[in-house]
Structure formats: C-alpha cells, structure tokens
C-alpha cells in the first residue's frame, strides 16, 4: 500500500512548474515541482482529500476542490501558485460546489452548485478580482454543467438526462438566450466542446453506430438549424473513451478503448490531420491530462502494467517527452507483478463474457479463485498496473475480473443490455462466472473454492451472488454495495436519483422488476459467509443499505460481518482505512476459501 504514483497533473502556463495530486501522506493532496526531477513541495495538507481543479490561465492562482470525509459535497478554494493559505470561494455542508471552467482572460471562474435545490444545479460566475459570485445561468430545474466557454462569454451547457445521456445548449448571457444544440429529447450519449471553426461543435456520440466516435458538427449553410456532420479519425470498431481540445483550438486529443487498452490519438483542430504523438507505443494505457493555454505542453499518464503510473510532459513544439516526477515503490519490485491475460467464459445463453485473469506464480493447487466485479455498472475492468489486484495474487488467489453485459467498452448493445428490467435476463452472468472458474482453474481432478468481491455496483453483484445465486460462491466481500434497489433509489442523494433511475428503472413503474433484482428479496437463501464494508458518509449508497442486509442475514444465523467506517464515504480515501478495507477483504476470503476441497 506504500506504492503510490503522483497524478499527471497540469503544467503552469509558462511551462516551469508542474502541479499534481499525490497521496504520499495517506490522503490526496496537491504538490508541485519546479522543473523536471526537482524536489516535490507539498502545497495543501490536513485530513481531507484535496485536488487540483485548474490553474488560472495567468498562472498566478490554483483552483482547488476539497471534500470532507468522502461526503462528495466538495468545496471550492483558491491558493497562490507559490503556496500559502487557501481562500474560500464556497464550501457549504450538504451542498455540492464543483469547478466547471475558467475564462481565457483569467477574470472569471465558473462553478455549479445545488445550493438552491438538492436535485438541480445552478451555474455561478465568480469574479476573481472582486471576490464576488453571481448567477450565470439558472434553469430552475436540471443537472446543468459548463462543458466549454467562448472568449465572448458564451457557455456550452450540458444537461444530464440519465446515467449516460445528455442534452447540449448554448447560453448567450448578453441576450439571455438559451439555444438547443444536440441531444434534446433523445436517449443518446453526447459529449461536446467548441471546435476551431465558427459555430462548430466537436462531439463524441454513439448515436449513428455501435461505438462512440468523434465527429465535427458544423452549421449547415443551406439548412438553418441543421448540422453538417463529419466523422474524424480512423474508423475503428472501438469506443472513443474521451477527448479534449486546447484553449487555442489548435489540437484535438482523444483516446480509443481497444479491448480495454487505452490508445492516445491527436488531430489538427482545423484540418483534422492526424498528428504524431511522441509517447510509448507498447503501454497498456496512455491517457492525456491538461494542456497549457498556449497549446505547447500536455501532461500524459503512461501505464505499462508492471510499473505505477508514470507522468510525462509532451512538448509539441519540439516533439519530445520528459518525466517531471517519479512514483514511489519502497521495498517492492513491481516488475514481478502478474501480467493480465484476456480470456472469456460462456454465459448460459452462449454469449462470451470477457474476463481478465491474474494468477500467482505458485499456490496449493487448485488455487482458490476470487471473482471481482467492477462498479458502475457502466464501467469496465481494464488491464494495467493494480496494487489491489496484485495483493490478492500475492495471497495465493487467482484474481479474475469479468466484464459482464452492461459493462462499457464493448459497444452500445452490450452497454445497454442491463438497462431497467433487461437486467433480469443477464444478471445470470454473475453465477456463470463462478461455474466457469470452478472448471477453468481445476487441478488434479479437484475444483477450486471460489469467492466473490466488489465495490459499489460490484458490491451489489456480490450481494446478488450470495443471495439470488446462493451456492455459486463459497464466500463474499461486499464494499458499499446496494442491498435493495427500491430503498437505494429512495435514499440516494437527490442529484443522483434521476441518473440512477435511467439505469436501474423507475421505483413505481418498474417496482416488480426492482424487487426481483434486489438482494434483500433472497436473504433467506444465504448459506455462505459474507463480509460487508461501508462508509458512514456515503451519499451514493447510504449506510442503511449495509445495515439492513446485515441484520437480515444475521437473523437467519448465517455468518455475516459488518464493518462501518465513520470517516469515509463511497469507499476509502484515507490510507489507514484503505489498508483495513483491502486487508480485511483478502484475509476474509483467504480464510474461507482455504477450507475444504
């Protein structure tokens, strides 16, 4: 757990200082280095996680976010780039205050907050000279965000309408005019920024195909209100994971999800011509960070699978990369970490489910197996460097991570296969993973014992594995998992409820399906030991989800242990709590999977 990598961070506009996040103190704080290889200096401290949101374009000031006890109600602060005391912009209990964007002239900072209504966001503009805030946009309802800002003050606004879907509009403050652009009334994915041409939007969407692709949307001169749409980049059967364009609108960076591996690409923003990216070609993941206002420098992250994330700075003018800081690996040779193998297992209907496999070099055959389900559910288990996964392997456990139907990265049909009541048809992917593991890792005519582990939606998967599919797994560890979709939808934070309904179903219209898909419905079936871990301050999956299923299972006389962390939210952020969570999970599974044949 002492293996820690600094984040890629952001370079100061003059290219002389790198600001980044690092958890070397036990909690994420903001640091800086004044040149490649210089000694790092800690800028923020305390017991609450603090992160770099932005550097003001003039380079004098940092914009910081700070959250207390994992409540996910962060505050917004300013700090001199040279260091010093934080200056409060807004931090209100039970209210989210999130940075959104900066104006190019360094005068205004935009942020959103649900301080007026818990389920809606207002867009504020903060004057850095006057230290005053004013409402920039308030639609009274909706989860609004600032996706981009024009130099003339126009705002590209994103309104979230579901877990993945959104509508984009342009707000012109001088005219108090809101113009719909893309996504209105649709149930499609959109991610948009202003492009380099007049009226142009750069858009990532999967509306017209199975996979997300990057497009240029330009106003159609012959058909007012319509778009001329041009696909950008090479056509591939993989999703575009994310993209960005620098402040000067000179270069577009985007990443492709190639079977779980991340590939970085670049385009000239005006001609769309592919640009050479001077980064390693053999890494598992290469991701982009922030670009300086002049477009010259970009931070990138490189993960080769056997070393912690490395941060490099690309100098586009010279076509070079340079490392500014290094990760910490005290007393650990990370080159011996188990390499991921990409495999698949058959679901009961014949569908091949992708799965990542890490195996120990040796163990008492047959090696016990831990099936780890990812969160989301619109997420994806990916190859790459993982301290947590390696700790299971070091304990003599085979560690496998399925990307069941509903996971991201395999196209639109796969992603939406579990929406609402459809989940009933594919939830069996959870049990089928255990069946496959007992055959795949058998040795000497004996099948291994199999445990299940996961957090958030992965925790929900654990609880379904241990209840609805009781007997499929020999032990389970649930971290901040949903125990009843009905109580979860009633009690999760208001700003999240609309997003989760689009994924799981409506509490009223889909009540029967939600009951069938809730672990609490099947607690009388539990017949194997279970460990439940939960943060008391969790706004996503409230602590009551853990308490109610623990009490019910315990009442049935089945071994069920509950650990509640009073100073954590949706998972653990503090080092000592991460040690307790992961250590107890591994210890519990190792103990219960070692019993019997």
Image (cartoon, rainbow, N blue to C red):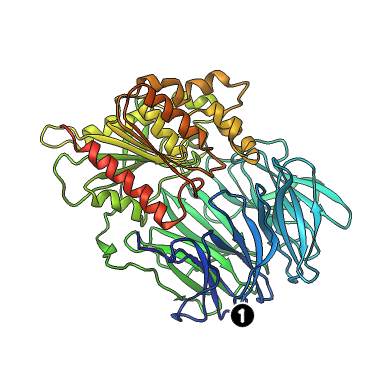
Residue drawn at x 65%, y 41% is 495
How many marks on residues? 1
Residue 189 versus residue 86: which sits nearer the camera? 86
Name the quarter where the N terminus is drawn: bottom left
Residue 468 appears in the rendering: no
- The answer to whether residue 259 is above or below residue 575 is above
Residue 453 versus residue 263: which sits nearer the camera? 453
- The answer to whether residue 1 is above or below residue 229 is below
Mark 1 packing: few (<14 Cα in 10 Å), some, or many (20+)? some
Residue drawn at x 73%, y 48% is 115
Residue drawn at x 58%, y 57% is 243
Residue drawn at x 37%, y 29% is 465
Give the side of residue 169 with respect to residue 313, left or right: right
Name the quarter where the C terminus is drawn: top left
Give the side of residue 190 with respect to residue 218, left or right: left
Give the side of residue 226 with respect to residue 94, left or right: right
User: Disc 1 on helix, strand or loop?
Assistant: loop
Residue 507 appears in the rendering: yes
Q: Position of residue 317 (x, y in %)?
A: 56, 78
Q: Position of residue 462 (x, y in %)?
A: 39, 34
- The answer to whether residue 451 is above or below residue 134 is above
Residue at the disc numbered 1: 14
Residue 120 versus residue 96: which sits nearer the camera? 96
Q: Position of residue 69 (x, y in %)?
A: 53, 52
As drawn, the residue found furthest toward the right would be 175
Q: Position of residue 26 (x, y in %)?
A: 43, 62
Residue 208 picture quarter: top right
As drawn, the residue found furthest toward the left would be 444
């Amino acid at each position: 757990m002492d293996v820690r990598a600094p984040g890629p961070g952001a370079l100061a506009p003059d290219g002389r200082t790198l600001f980044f996040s690092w958890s070397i103190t036990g909690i994420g704080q903001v640091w800086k280095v004044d040149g490649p290889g210089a000694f790092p200096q800690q800028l923020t401290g305390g017991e609450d996680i603090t992160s770099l949101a932005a550097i003001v374009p003039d380079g004098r000031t940092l914009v910081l976010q700070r959250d207390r006890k994992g409540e996910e109600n962060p505050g917004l602060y300013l700090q001199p780039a040279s260091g010093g005391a934080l200056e409060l912009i807004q931090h209100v209990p039970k209210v989210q205050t999130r940075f959104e964007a900066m104006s190019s002239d360094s005068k205004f900072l935009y942020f959103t907050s649900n301080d007026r209504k818990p389920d809606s966001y207002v867009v504020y503009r903060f004057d850095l000279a006057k230290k005053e805030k004013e409402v920039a946009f308030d639609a009274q309802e909706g989860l609004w965000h600032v996706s981009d800002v024009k130099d003339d003050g126009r705002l590209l606004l994103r309104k979230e309408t579901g877990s993945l879907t959104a509508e984009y509009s342009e707000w012109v403050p001088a005219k108090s005019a809101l113009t719909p652009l893309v996504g209105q009334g649709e149930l499609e994915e959109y991610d948009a920024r202003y492009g380099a041409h007049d009226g142009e939007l750069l858009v990532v969407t999967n509306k017209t195909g199975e996979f997300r692709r990057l497009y240029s949307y330009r106003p159609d001169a012959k058909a007012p209100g319509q778009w001329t749409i041009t696909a950008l980049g090479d056509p591939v059967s993989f999703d575009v994971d994310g993209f960005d364009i620098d402040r000067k609108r000179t270069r577009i960076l985007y990443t492709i999800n190639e079977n779980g591996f991340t590939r970085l690409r670049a385009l000239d923003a005006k001609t769309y011509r592919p640009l050479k990216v001077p980064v390693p070609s053999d890494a598992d993941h290469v991701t982009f960070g922030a670009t300086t206002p002049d477009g010259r420098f970009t931070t990138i992250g490189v993960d080769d699978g056997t070393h912690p994330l490395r941060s490099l700075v690309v100098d586009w003018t010279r076509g070079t990369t340079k490392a500014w800081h290094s990760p910490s690996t005290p007393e650990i040779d990370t080159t011996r970490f188990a390499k991921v193998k990409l495999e698949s297992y058959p679901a009961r209907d014949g569908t091949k489910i992708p799965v990542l496999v890490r195996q120990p070099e040796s163990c008492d055959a047959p090696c016990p197996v831990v099936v780890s389900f990812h969160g989301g559910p619109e997420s994806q288990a990916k190859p790459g460097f993982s301290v947590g996964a390696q700790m299971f392997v070091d304990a003599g456990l085979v560690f496998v991570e399925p990307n069941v139907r509903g996971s991201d990265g395999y196209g639109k049909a796969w992603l939406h296969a579990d929406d609402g009541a459809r989940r009933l048809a594919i939830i069996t992917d959870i049990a089928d993973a255990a069946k496959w593991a007992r055959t795949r890792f058998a040795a000497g005519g004996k099948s291994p014992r199999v445990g299940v582990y996961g957090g958030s939606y992965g925790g929900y998967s654990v609880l379904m594995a241990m209840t609805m599919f009781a007997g499929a797994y020999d032990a389970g560890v649930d971290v901040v998992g949903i125990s009843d979709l009905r109580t979860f939808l009633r009690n999760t934070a208001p700003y999240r409820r609309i997003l989760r309904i689009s994924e799981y179903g409506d509490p009223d219209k889909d009540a029967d399906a939600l009951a069938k898909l809730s672990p609490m419905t099947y607690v009388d079936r539990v017949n194997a030991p279970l460990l439940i871990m939960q943060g008391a301050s969790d706004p996503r999956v409230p602590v009551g989800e853990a308490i109610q299923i623990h009490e019910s299972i315990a009442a049935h006389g089945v071994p069920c242990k509950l650990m509640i962390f009073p100073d954590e939210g949706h998972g653990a952020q503090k080092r000592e709590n991460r040690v307790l969570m992961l250590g107890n999970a591994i210890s519990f599974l190792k103990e219960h999977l070692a019993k019997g044949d």
